């Protein structure tokens, strides 16, 4: 641990951001899990909210934008399969 005050502050900020990113990531993963487990009617209502959560993770840099695109694509494909 460095003795510079700026470095100490950076460590504090990093820990806070890490905790926040873990919370948002876990919340989104749970939402995706619940969406996959739900029936067709509930899934149609939940999909826009879950897609929004994924987009926010990518915007924050918590996940890569390509991973976000892949997740959204897989969810949309699953919802379209339910519609048939």
Image: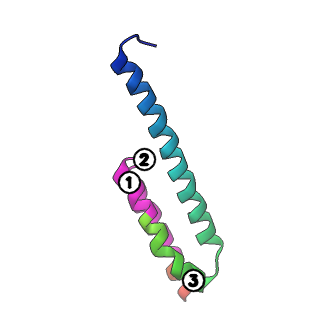
Q: Nearer the viewer, residue 58 or 24?
A: 24
User: What is the x, y in percent for residue 58?
Assistant: 38, 54
- Magenta region, mostly helix, strand or loop? helix
Q: Label 2 neighbourhood size at 10 Å, few (<14), some (14-19), many (20+)?
A: some
The kind of secondary structure element at disc 3 is helix
Write down the quadrant of residue 5 in the picture.
top left
CB under 8 Å between discs 1 and 2: yes
Residue holding disc 1: 58
For this view, does 47 lie left or right of residue 8? right
Write down the quadrant of residue 40 in the picture.
bottom right
User: What is the x, y in percent for residue 8?
Assistant: 41, 20
Q: CA distance from mark 1 to mark 2?
A: 6 Å
Residue holding disc 3: 82
Q: Label 1 neighbourhood size at 10 Å, few (<14), some (14-19), many (20+)?
A: some
Q: Label 3 neighbourhood size at 10 Å, few (<14), some (14-19), many (20+)?
A: few
The kind of secondary structure element at disc 2 is loop
Q: CA distance from mark 3 to mark 1?
A: 26 Å
């Amino acid at each position: 641990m460095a003795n510079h005050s700026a470095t100490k502050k950076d460590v504090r900020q990093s820990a806070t951001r890490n905790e926040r990113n873990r919370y948002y990531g876990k919340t989104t993963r749970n939402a995706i899990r619940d969406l996959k487990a739900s029936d067709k009617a509930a899934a149609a209502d939940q999909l826009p909210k879950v897609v929004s959560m994924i987009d926010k993770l990518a915007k924050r840099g918590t996940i890569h934008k390509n991973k976000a695109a892949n997740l959204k694509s897989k969810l949309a494909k699953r919802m379209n399969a339910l519609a048939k």
